[in-house]
């Protein structure tokens, strides 16, 4: 009975979403891979824009310093990446003004760099009707391509996000923080299955490799072999490369698949490469350096 209710609500939401929202961009798995091949990059730039870290001169020269910072970073890095990932916490912390900057940042990317895959790093997940509102916010009204979602309230908390055609859910699987060991590696006494593996296996019943990705921290690169055994064809969003110490070479060694299958995120190393007038130029250089390394990886793997 519960499964029937979930299916009914999911179908209802899908119909509503298809009628209410017109998407300005479509990014299928194949299109994402083709963009990776064209740009020779699987770099995602994290727009974790902290008002306490952006160059001070912006506050003197602009009435809109956070947005001006984002625009400059985007303009400097767009040729070298295939995705942007605004971290919602950095915008929500600024109240209404922060939400306004976030929306204008997404619109700016859409208008000027329509080939970019845009991720709402929101880590949402709640009971079904609440998740439906979160999904409407990010995949409907704000026109992100994808949103990060926490899986631990189960299927009915994730399914509303999957009702948006040609949009993506990026499910937290194995994170890069120290606290990941508190729960994510807990083992079932009978099967030996770890909790993150249970999440992966169970979620395969919710979506496909055409609308479901997974977050896997770069500092857990050695676990990618186990993860790929369960989800060999899915894309993985991999944060933690750069300032957090993750190795791009290790991530590629264990995580690359026949369609690349990786979006590797770098935030602080790129966007805060300089706090001076040359901040955008230095960010572009850092992004180019990562892109060059990625091009070598893709070429060696025979993907370009």
Image (cartoon, rainbow, N blue to C red):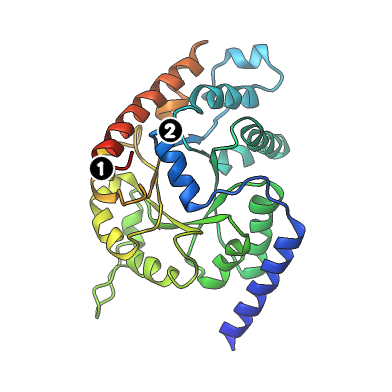
Residue under label 1: 301
Could you say where residue 74 lies in the image, as x and y percent from the top left?
Answer: 55, 27
> In the picture, residue 88 is in which quadrant?
top right
The earlier-in-sequence mark between 2 and 1 is: 2
Which quarter of the figure is the C terminus placed in?
A: top left
Number of residues whose C-alpha sits closer than 10 Å to that of mark 1, classed few (under 14), some (14–19) or many (20 or more):
some
Question: What residue is drawn where x is 58% and y is 27%?
Answer: 70
- Does 273 sit above or below residue 17? above
Q: Nearer the viewer, residue 188 or 170?
A: 170
Which quarter of the figure is the N terminus placed in?
A: bottom right
- Does 298 sit above or below residue 274? below
Question: What residue is drawn where x is 63% and y is 82%?
Answer: 5
Could you say where residue 107 lies in the image, as x and y percent from the top left?
Answer: 67, 36
Could you say where residue 152 lies in the image, as x and y percent from the top left?
Answer: 47, 66
* Element type where label 2 sits in the image: helix
Q: Nearer the viewer, residue 271 or 60?
A: 271
Residue 100 shows which numbered tag? none
Question: What residue is drawn where x is 59% and y is 32%?
Answer: 113
Residue under label 2: 39
Q: Nearer the viewer, residue 19 or 271?
A: 19
């Amino acid at each position: 009975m519960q499964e029937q209710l979930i299916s009914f609500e999911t179908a209802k939401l899908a119909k509503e979403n298809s009628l209410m929202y017109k998407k300005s961009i479509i990014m299928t798995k194949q299109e994402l891979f083709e963009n990776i091949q064209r740009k020779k990059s699987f770099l995602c730039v994290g727009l974790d824009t902290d008002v306490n870290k952006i160059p001070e001169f912006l506050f003197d020269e602009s009435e809109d310093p956070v947005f001006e910072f984002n625009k400059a970073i985007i303009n400097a890095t767009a040729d070298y990446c295939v995705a942007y990932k605004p971290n919602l916490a950095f915008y929500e912390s600024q109240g209404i003004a922060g939400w306004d900057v976030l929306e204008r940042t997404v619109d700016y990317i859409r208008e000027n760099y329509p080939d970019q895959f845009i991720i709402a790093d929101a880590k949402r997940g709640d009971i079904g009707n609440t998740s439906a509102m979160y999904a409407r916010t990010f995949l409907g009204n704000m026109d992100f391509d994808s949103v990060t979602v926490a899986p631990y309230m189960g299927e009915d908390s994730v399914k509303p996000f999957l009702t948006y055609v040609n949009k993506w859910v990026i499910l937290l699987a194995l994170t890069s923080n120290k606290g990941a060991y508190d729960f994510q590696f807990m083992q079932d006494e009978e099967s030996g299955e770890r909790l993150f593996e249970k999440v992966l296996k169970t979620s395969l019943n919710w979506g496909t490799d055409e609308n479901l990705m997974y977050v896997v921290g770069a500092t857990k690169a050695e676990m990618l072999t186990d993860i790929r055994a369960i989800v060999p064809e899915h894309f993985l969003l991999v944060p933690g490369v750069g300032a957090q110490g993750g190795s791009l070479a290790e991530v590629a060694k264990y995580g690359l698949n026949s369609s690349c299958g990786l979006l590797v995120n770098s935030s602080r190393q790129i966007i805060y490469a300089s706090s001076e007038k040359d901040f955008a130029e230095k960010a572009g250089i850092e992004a180019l350096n990562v892109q060059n390394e990625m091009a070598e990886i893709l070429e060696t793997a025979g993907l370009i």
